[in-house]
Amino acid sequence: MVMLDEGKQTAGDIAKDELNQSGSTNAAVNMAISGARGSMDNLTMMAGSIGQAKVRGKRLERGYLDRVLPHFQRGGRGASERGFIDSSFKRGLRPTEFFMLSVSGRESLVDTAVRTSKSGYMQRRLINAMDDLKVTSDNMFSVRNTANRIIQFSYGEDGIDPSRGVHGSAFNIDVIVDDALGTEGKTLVERESFEHEVAEDDLGAWEDASEYDGGEN
C-alpha cells in the first residue's frame, strides 16, 4: 500500500505541476483552488493516476478463487492484480480497472446510504424526545418540560448559550474589555488620550444636568 501510494503521489505531483503552469486558463484548476468544488487530488486522478482501489482500507482480496477477477493468474500479488489503477479518467480505464474501481466504489456508496439513514433516524428520535423541553427565565436558566418538571437545573449543565458563547465562555470577555478600555485586541490606546476622552464625557454629562435643572445645582 505504501509503495503504491508513493507511485500515485509521484504521478499526481507531475500532474499538479503541469496543471499549475496552465494558470487561469484551466477552469478545473480555478474551481479547485477557489474551493467552489473538488480539489487538486481530484484533478490528479483526472490527469495523472487514480491509484489503488481500496476496500476497508486494504487492497482488493475477495472475488473469484485466489484472484479478484478471472482475467489474472491465480495467486497473483502484483499491483494490477490487486486493484492498482495506473490510468486516469482523461485517458480512460481498461475493463479490468473499471471493474476494480467499481468494487471500491460500492463500499463508499453503501457507507453513504447507511450513514445517512442512521444519522437521520437519530436526529428524528432526539427531536421527538426533546420537543416539549423549554428554557425558563429563572436565575439558573433551568430546562423544564410542559409539566414544569425540572430536567436540568442549568441549561446544558453550564448555562452557556452555544449560539452566543465563545470557546466555552458565556460571552466574549475580550470584546467587552476592548469596548470599556478603548482597546483593539492587544493594541492599547494611549493613557492620556483615554483620560482626556473620559474628562470630556464627564464635562458633557455635567453640562446636560445643569441645563436640565436650570443651573440651580
Image (cartoon, rainbow, N blue to C red):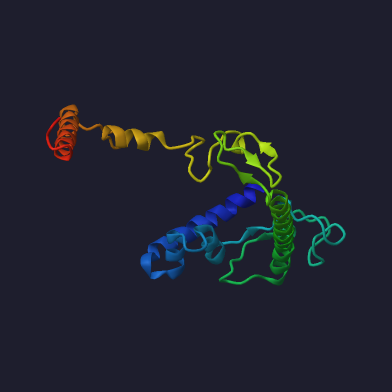
Q: Residue 28, position in %: x, y?
A: 46, 67
Give the image quarter of residue 92.
bottom right
- Give the camera-side residue of 113 and 118: 118
Picture mark count: 0
Q: Is residue 185 visible?
A: no
Q: Is residue 35 left or right of residue 104?
A: left
Q: Is residue 4 visible?
A: yes
Q: Residue 56, position in %: x, y?
A: 73, 51
Image height of 190 relative to 116, above or below: above
- Give the camera-side residue of 104 and 175: 175
Image height of 210 relative to 94, above or below: above
- Give the camera-side residue of 65 and 213: 213
At x 39% / y 66%, what residue is drawn? 22
Give the image quarter of residue 103.
bottom right
At x 69% / y 66%, what residue is drawn? 97
Q: Is residue 37 left or right of residue 198?
A: right
Q: Residue 82, position in %: x, y?
A: 74, 57
Give the image quarter of residue 181.
top left
Residue extending furthest toward the right: 65
At x 67% / y 48%, what residue is drawn? 1
Image height of 125 relative to 207, above or below: below
- Give the camera-side residue of 77 and 98: 98
Q: Residue 59, position in %: x, y?
A: 73, 53
Look at the image and tell me in which quarter the C terminus lies: top left
Q: Is residue 49 left or right of residue 189?
A: right
